[in-house]
Image (tube, rainbow, N blue to C red):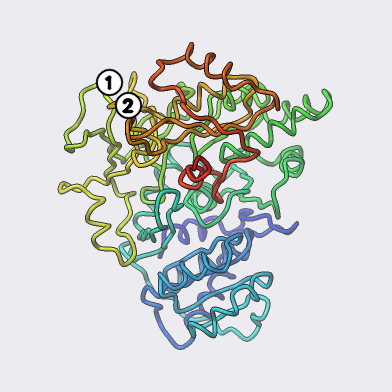
Amino acid sequence: MLKLVKNATAKAENQAIISNNQSYNYQDLLNSSHQFASLLLENSVDLNETRIAYMVSPGFDYVSVQWGIWRAGGIAVPLCISYPLPSLQYVIEDTMAKIVIAGAEYAEILRPLVAENGFRFIVLAEVDAATIQLKKLPNLQSSRKAMILYTSGTTNLPKGVVTTHANIEAQVSTLVKSWQWSAKDHILCILPLHHVHGIINVISCALWSGATVEFLPSFSADGVFGVFRKGRINIFMAVPTIYCKLISHWESLPADQQKQITDTLAKFRLMVSGSAALPVLVMEKWKTISTHTLLERYGMTEIGMGISNPYEAERKAGYIGKPLTGVKARLVDENNVVVKRGQAGEIQIKGKNVFLEYWNKPEETQKTFTVDGWFKTGDVAVVEKGYYRILGRDSIDIIKSGGYKISALEIEEILRTNAAIEDCSVVGIPNEEWGELVAAAIIVNHPNLDLKALNTWIREKMPSYKTPRQYIIVEELPRNAMGKVTKNDLKKLFN
């Protein structure tokens, strides 16, 4: 029996999910997922790692479908509900999914692919639960493949990351211990459910612990604060762009409503930020509003979470913390040699949390691991007083200009301290003489910002070789579903 299911069985009467104004306990989830697993099995006794793609809105049905796939022995392939048809087609065809499941609102989007690919198509609204005969479910080993999630594709074509049940159990159990989850916890889920952040950190950690997950049908800052004011939530996890939207909304409210929200937030147990670098200014503003220092952590689709600021000890702004229990981390240079203390290097990770393989990409899989089994993250960091500080992604955030290696993230942090700049993103653009030139896209608060004055200002803050040589003013930055700036798209704006 899977550990998630075993834990749920022991807490059958606990409230598991609040969705669409309905409450479900763990027994409801066990019954529904068993029923759905039986539907999937049809005449089989085990789906034997069949890939099953599903496009279902966040809520009870989503979790029931996901658990049903796992309990039937299948591999869960969640589809992003905001993706256009070509992106959905890419995932379905790349995984060679045999079964596709759709919530009623997504059925017509996916129907064109049904005729083209001939897979079994299940629309949840058309399922007659009364006709499903419960089947004996297969007894699964933790080494079985459980899920394929696709990388963000910010720097290249998305790859399918295959994790086993053992990987998931390692990822979840580490966070449950490190962040002190318990059955008393109640978390609000507003994150997309085709990435690790929502699936592992929020839903799986909560359900592993016997806690409650509450879903919001659609995001709005007012809606989030409305749920908070009810007093049930004590854990919140979001990406930096969400915190920015919450801050902006809070600042627009009358003083009495601001105080009410602050008093409510002060009672929370834990607030976490991830999926993209957390600007120090955002962390400081949120602390003023909530009284909480956001816990920033570091993870990837391939490893779940690897490094985290501590739950009880000091959380350092601008740092991602220390390796989690059971996770090994090291920094290496271009020759794969561990760097000296205080020097920058690529983060490499080893542990039971690390994924099995890239789907149908053996060469890519081999290239991303060292001979001695370390996963190459491609992220560059430095360790200062025991805490890891990210300098950026080697392929996109480390700008190689005039023989220097420059951190785009460091420049972004400085730019955000200028009162005239609301947000920014820095990239390297090709240049024959310098290799790359530092270029910055900025969102401004003041339409008459003097770029020459800005350039003079930033040269007082950092060495001249790090300062941007080009600026463009934009209304918004290109981002993916998790709020990460897609820098390859941004580079095109400078041509």
Residue 403's spot in the image, x, y percent? 27, 27
User: Circle 1 is placed at which residue position?
Assistant: 342
Quarter assignment of residue 49: bottom left
Q: Is residue 415 above or below residue 168?
A: above
Q: Secondary structure at mark 2?
A: strand
User: Circle 2 is placed at which residue position?
Assistant: 382
Q: Residue furthest front?
A: 432
Q: Is residue 140 above or below residue 154?
A: below
Q: CA distance from mark 1 to mark 2?
A: 6 Å
Q: Nearer the viewer, residue 334 or 174?
A: 334
Q: Secondary structure at mark 1?
A: loop
Q: Nearer the viewer, residue 454 or 183?
A: 454
Q: Is residue 139 left or right of residue 218?
A: left
Q: Nearer the viewer, residue 242 or 387?
A: 242
Picture residue at 54% right of the left edge, 36% below the top:
272
Amino acid type, residue under disc 2 in the picture: Val
Of the numbered discs 1 and 2, the one sitting upstream in the chain is 1
Q: Is residue 154 left or right of residue 262?
A: left
Residue 256's spot in the image, x, y percent? 84, 24
Residue 51's spot in the image, x, y percent? 42, 72
Picture residue at 43% right of the left edge, 39% below the top:
177
Q: Residues within 10 Å of mark 2 (few under 14, many from 20)?
A: many
Amino acid type, residue under disc 1 in the picture: Gly
Q: Is residue 71 above or below residue 20?
A: below
Q: Are marks 1 and 2 in contact (CB under 8 Å)?
A: yes
Picture residue at 58% right of the left edge, 16% below the top:
453
Picture residue at 58% right of the left edge, 23% below the top:
281
Q: Is residue 198 above or below residue 337?
A: below
Residue 265's spot in the image, x, y percent? 68, 30
